[in-house]
Amino acid sequence: MNRFLLPLAAFALLLVVLIVGLKHAPQKDIIPSPLIGKSAPHFTLPNLLDEGHPVSDDALKGRWSLVNVWGTWCGECRAEHATLLQIKQEARVPIIGIDWRDQDADAKNWLTQLGDPYERVGTDHDGRVAIDWGVYGAPESFLIDPAGTVVYKHVGAMTPQVWQQEFLPRVGAAPAPAAPAPAGSGA
Amino acid sequence: MRPSRFAPALLLSAGLAALGLTASFSASAVDNTPPLPDPQLQQRYFELTHELRCMQCQNEALADSPVSLAADLRLQVRELLLAGQSDDQIRDHMVARYGEFILFRPRMSARNAWLWGAPPVLMLIGLVVAWRVVRTRRRLVGGDDDGGDADDADDGGSPGP
């Protein structure tokens, strides 16, 4: 019996390691950003709608903010637009837009037609600022704390669920009043 | 009959050659920027853009990827090379933005040292186990010869030699 004990224990240990590994494995297509916990990258971009008032990382200091990288060529950006408008309506966290590799005329049209959720939008025509932010696919959204530190990054379309479960708790705001509803929805 | 016997082989080799040609063409067609002035820089550019990952189409190198992000990143590699940065500085520049994932060849760090160390350690454990198993087996085989003695000892309690 004893001679099986050691291999069995080793196997059990391996099993535990693998199960824990599987449970904690991040989603395969989501790459952790090295920017988390660091200061937001410095940038200065032309303002899409307000020429003469460049958009820079100064806009990220002293308050919570959401930096949203988008483009009119990006389908998922259209999908998340309604959520961004909702976030604007909540008026808790202002959204700073970075319009990535886009035409100004297209971007202006987009905002006129779909509504403008942004406090201000910087235009990153050659994609340099996006690279400094480690952007690899729009849309991407970064949560920035009042000290200007990147707290969280979401790749892909922003949804009400993501906003309420991943972003708002980090801001420290109480979840929206509608949040407890799902628990009692069975009634 | 005779020509038709060779026809498939000919077709196949022609097809393979064509495939190879298109592959080599498409590989060079993606990055159509002019070469760097210094051949040595161009060589480093070639190597760096082949060992950095295109983050958008993750199994392609920067050099092979047609997406605009890859073009932007190739441009940065070019500019950093022209600015006199070393290969390591350029790798660090990319890792600071995109994480270790952008490197096709992961670097050894405190976090993944165990991963690099595990194979030799496991190999050593395996060797020790194998050696012990072999030794016990050998002793058992040898024990067959002595088995009579042992049995005798058990049975009769006869005195040893």
Image (cartoon, rainbow, N blue to C red):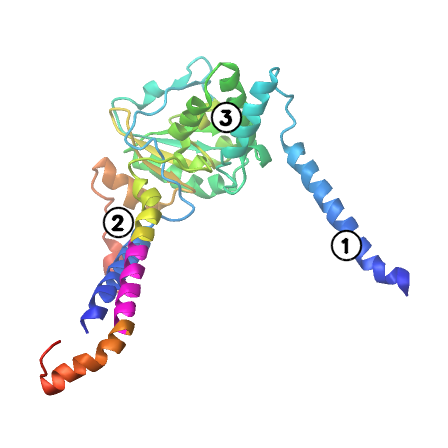
Q: Quick check: A166 left or right of A137?
A: left
Q: Is residue A11 above or below residue B24?
A: below
Marks 3/1: CA distance?
Answer: 45 Å
Q: Quick check: A95 left or right of A147?
A: right
Residues drawn in magenta: B125-140
Residues A18 and A38: in front is A18
Quarter of the image where the N terminus of chain B is located: bottom right
The residue at the point 81 percent across, 59 percent down is B8
Q: Secondary structure at mark 3?
A: loop
Q: Amino acid at mark 1?
A: Leu
Q: Secondary structure at mark 1?
A: helix
Number of numbered discs present? 3
Chain under numbered label 2: A
Q: Secondary structure at mark 2?
A: loop
Q: Is residue B18 above or below residue B76?
A: below
The picture places residue B109, in percent across and down from the top left corner, at 32, 35
Instruction: Categorize mark 2 by other alpha carbons within 10 Å: few (<14), some (14-19), many (20+).
Output: few
The picture places residue A111, in percent across and down from the top left corner, at 48, 31
Q: Give residue B12's mark.
A: 1
Q: Is mark 2 in CB contact (under 8 Å) with mark 1? A: no
Q: Amino acid at mark 2?
A: Ala
Instruction: Categorize mark 1 by other alpha carbons within 10 Å: few (<14), some (14-19), many (20+).
Output: few
Q: Which residue is mark 3?
A: A127
Q: Classify residue A118 by image quadrant.
A: top left
Q: Which residue is mark 2?
A: A178
Marks 2/1: CA distance?
Answer: 65 Å
Name the front one of labels 3 and 2: 3
Name the front one of labels 2 and 1: 1
